[in-house]
Amino acid sequence: MHKKIRERYLVSSVCVVAIVFISGCMAHTQHQYPTADVPTSEPAYLTKVKTAATEQIVSKASIIMMQEGKPRELQAGSNGFTCLISPDGTPLCADQNALDWMKAVRERTDPPDRIGFIYMLAGDTGTTNHHPHQRETRLHWVQTGPHVMVVGPRVREMVGYSRTLDVADPKQPYSMFPGLPYEHLMLPTQ
């Protein structure tokens, strides 16, 4: 009797493991990158921006929506992260250091000498790995699935990451904008 129970338990355990493995693989193969769309209605914006990070991060983050060039707060936060949808349609959540880094990139100034962290768990809409201000060239184009980013000048000192312009496998960690002041680490999560 105990032998049959153990066999059933073993078969059940193997089935559960197989289902979890297959589900994980299916979720990975079914990943869809975000669209370039930046929703203009609050409900649609909130739905999209909440794909940027885990619920534990988003639920306590500030959520802002740009309207007529000015940020409008849709949710007050308490964890130091701000979530938004970038102009290219990528949902993200960033800490204050990363927001300051993003501002430096946008304004073409030297980035602050602080490490920042950005969640992009919905993936990105793709960009050139050549230079952050030459997206339209599509040189060394790369699109990354779900990932987190570590930003700041000290990233250039970190070793063990691919620093080639042509990213061979965006599912492996790599450096974006290698050799530039805006170099940062891309760390895929799948």
Image (cartoon, rainbow, N blue to C red):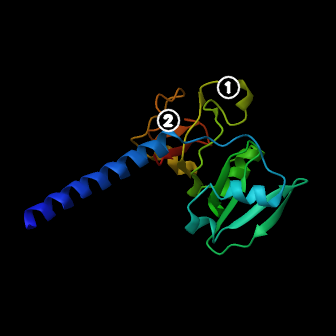
Q: Earlier in the sequence, mark 2 or mark 1?
A: 1
Residue located 73% across and 60% down the image? 46
Residue in view at x 62 percent, y 29 percent: 130
Q: How many numbered dots are placed on residues in this image?
A: 2
The residue where tag 2 is placed is 170
Q: Quick check: 117 left or right of 46? A: left
**Quadrant in the picture for the N terminus:** bottom left
- Residue situated furthest front in the rendering: 1
Q: Amino acid at mark 1?
A: Arg
- State the mark number for residue 174: none
* Disc 2 to disc 1, C-alpha distance: 16 Å
State the image coordinates of residue 128 (x, y, percent, origin top left). 64, 31
As rendered, which of 121 and 12 lies closer to the eye?
A: 12
Q: x, y (%) of residue 117?
A: 57, 57
Q: Residues within 10 Å of mark 1 (few under 14, many from 20)?
A: some
Disc 2 and disc 1 in contact, CB within 8 angstroms: no
Q: Is residue 59 left or right of residue 159?
A: right
Return the x and y of residue 96 as percentages of the image width and height. Answer: 65, 63
Q: Residues within 10 Å of mark 2 (few under 14, many from 20)?
A: some
In the rendered image, the residue lying farthest to the bottom is 78
| Side (left or right) of 63 relative to 166 | right
Image position, residue 104 (x, y; %): 71, 49
Residue at numbered disc 1:
138
Which amino acid, by three-letter code, is at mark 2? Pro
Vertical order, 95 against 166 (above or below): below
* Residue found 59% across the figure and 41% down from its top: 32
What secondary structure is marked by label 2?
A: loop
Regarding mark 1 in the picture, which secondary structure is present there? loop
